[in-house]
Image (cartoon, grey):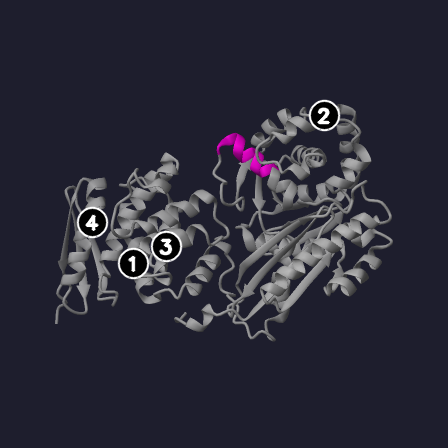
Amino acid sequence: MTDNNSNAEPTKRIAAIDLGTNSFHAVLVDIYPDGSFRTVNKLKEMVILAEKGLEDRLSREAMDRGLEALKRIKFLCDSHNVENILAYATSAIREAENGGDFIKEVGEQVGIRVRAISGKMEAEMIGLAVRHNIVLGDEMALMADIGGGSVEFIIGNDKEFVYYTSLKLGVARMAAAFVDSDPIEEKDIEKLQKHFSNELKEVAKLAKKHKVRTIIGSSGTMENIGEMVANRNSITAERSLNELEFKTKDFYDLYEVFIKLDEKQRLKEKGLEEKRVAIINPGMVLLKFLTDKLNIENIRISEGALREGMILDYINNQKEELHLDLLANFHDPRRRSVFELLRKCHWAQAHSTHVSQFAVQLFDEFKEELKLKESDRELLEFASLMHDIGYYISYRKHHKHALYLIRYSDLLGFKEDEINIMAHVARYHRKSVPKKKHKLYKKLNKKSRIRIKKLSAILRVADGLDRSHYQNVQNLEIDNTKEVINLLLTTQSDPELEIWGTLRKGELLEKLTGKKLKVFQVLEKK
């Protein structure tokens, strides 16, 4: 892969609008020549199409709320010079006998062409988004997108989806049909469970066949459940819920307390949005039913849902027209999103790759001595590749700019703790070592701070080994004795700058190992 500054210029700006039962969500994105995309703006409008449950017709009031919301979204799109608007209507509009009238009015009054997509197509796009946003392994997982009118279920892994469907089990629909009490009474819970048991026979059968042990939830209901669990268990999810993971037991602990609360008490629950207070319980009961029925062990959250799936589907279908050179080599969301960020920041590829190779070599040497885990190796590699992206903002304080860019770039596939670790390791590649007086570092948990200290000690040395940025050091040998760390360098030309840079940045590694760092040039035999 070569440096190509044209990669940093977007090819097209589009918007994707998901016209859901409870809310209309719009996301505006720039599409880049490598097929990646970056969010420019978002807007979420509460419309509550199913104000009295999902009936055969949309009320005039609901349609007017929808039209007003779409006018605001259209204004946002126009002010951002959006070239193409994708607008897909789901359950409530799809099923209403006057859904077609609403779509027609939107076209005439707002100027947006809305497509009513099938439940199967909706499920397919949600599956694409989940796979794009989080790391799926070989193990089959059950993806569940709990909406207001319907729930989409997908069974699959990183290579294939073996099943997808859309069922009329959304929380607004279920609340209207089965919940007559507040707090919800046992009889209503039993009615819901019985209904789920009848409707989910095929999903349960296939999930058992494929030995599913993990549920991946997307969209508002699952995100709210995830946020409530995170708040109760002090899990870091301040900036992003994407890749949030917790045990089924953590959900059960929440469920036992939460299900007994009335609406007033639910309003006080941290992590629950006010608009979901009245309809969240069927979602809680559905997740409890699935975890019990399928012996689920883990629950994960994906922030990618229908809107992102719409964008991915568009990119895939338009790649020739848009002349996109897709990042086809990166099936792993983690590596792919790191390289998307690197390209957008005009990264110094030769220097950063060189430093990354030294960092990984040093990691392998000191892994046991510093009590590091294999998972730390990948975080160090990525932090090394990204350590200089702060130059994109300015040379001055570029290490601090790198911290900001990594933290706020919505890197996919990483837990928030992992993003914080990579951001801080990059930040500490130069100037100060990690200190408690640094506010963001101080806010992190002790475990993360220890990992940052060890990994940044390695990166500092690796960066010193390419102080010139010209890849002068061709080969590194490490002679690690009980008292001394000898680094033996084979270089193209005089290595004084690299030796100076390495010794200057080696103090933290010396402190952590209790050894003296020495650097020598190895003269090649003629």
Asked whether the beta carbons under mark 4 and mark 2 sit within 8 Å of each other, the answer is no
What residue is at 35 percent from the left and 66 percent from the top? 349
Spatial distance from mark 4 to mark 1, Cα to Cα? Answer: 22 Å
Marked residue nearer the N-terminal end (3 or 2): 2
What type is the residue that disc 1 sits on?
A: Arg
Spatial distance from mark 2 to mark 1, Cα to Cα? Answer: 57 Å
Whole-percent x, y for residue 422 in the image:
38, 49
Label at residue 396: 1
Spatial distance from mark 3 to mark 1, Cα to Cα? Answer: 11 Å
What type is the residue that disc 2 sits on?
A: Pro
What type is the residue that disc 3 sits on?
A: Ala
Residue that mark 2 sits on: 183
Residue that mark 3 sits on: 402
437 drawn magenta: no
Rate crowding at label 1 as few (under 14), some (14 to 19) or many (20 or more) other CA atoms within 10 Å.
few
Quadrant for the C terminus in the image: bottom left
Query: Magenta span covers which residues?
Result: 225-234
Label at residue 178: none
Asked whether the beta carbons under mark 2 and mark 1 sit within 8 Å of each other, the answer is no
Marked residue nearer the N-terminal end (3 or 1): 1
Asked whether the beta carbons under mark 3 and mark 1 sit within 8 Å of each other, the answer is no
Marked residue nearer the N-terminal end (4 or 2): 2
Secondary structure category for the residue under label 2: loop
Secondary structure category for the residue under label 4: loop
Marked residue nearer the N-terminal end (3 or 4): 3
Label the magenta part by its dominant secondary structure.
helix
- Of discs 2 and 1, which sits in the foreground? 1
Secondary structure category for the residue under label 3: helix
